[in-house]
Amino acid sequence: MGDGGGGLEVDPDRSRVRCTGCRRTWRVWETSFHCSCGRRFEAKEVEEAVRELIRVASLLARVLAQQAQDLAEIRRAGEASFRAWAGRLAAAVAGSLGAVAGRLVGSLLRALD
């Protein structure tokens, strides 16, 4: 929105820009951007900045996706490790209970003799 009260409409299919205030149109690549500090940026500079922003965002998305995949693999490995440990514990407990039960039955049988 400029000082004259107009806004910009961009037609990406035709690569045209139109001022809604005065209805003037021009090519997107002829657009200049003005900072409040007085510096002027051409459309090509803005395009390069946007392309760099998209490149960095894409890289960040890939890094985050890889990190999520790594965390899922760590979780799966942790779950598998826990299941293996729990299985060994259950086998040890069952073995100990079996040995205790065997000694108990043996003691009872010897006592009955």
Image (cartoon, rainbow, N blue to C red):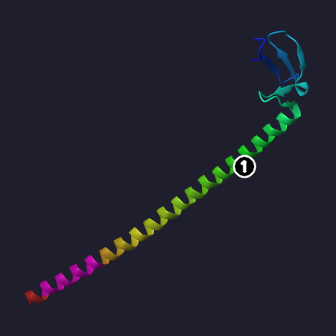
Confirm whether the magenta stretch covers residue 37: no
Residue at x 61% of width, y 55% of height = 67
Residue at x 56% of width, y 57% of height = 71
> Which residue is tagged 1?
59
Q: Please state the horizontal and vertical placement of residue 53, each as a whole percent of the image.
A: 75, 41
Residue 3 vs 81, above or below: the answer is: above
Q: Quadrant of residue 54?
A: top right
- What stretch of residues is rendered in magenta? 96-109
Q: Is residue 6 left or right of residue 79?
A: right
Residue 46 vs 24, above or below: the answer is: below
Residue at x 80% of width, y 39% of height = 49
Q: Quadrant of the N terminus?
A: top right
Q: Which of 68 and 6 is in front in this view?
A: 6
Query: What secondary structure prevails in the magenta region?
Result: helix
* Dot 1 alpha-carbon crowd within 10 angstroms: few under 14, some 14 to 19, many 20 or more: few
Residue at x 85% of width, y 30% of height = 40
Q: What residue type is labelled 1?
A: Leu
Q: Please state the horizontal and vertical placement of residue 77, each as a whole percent of the image.
A: 52, 64
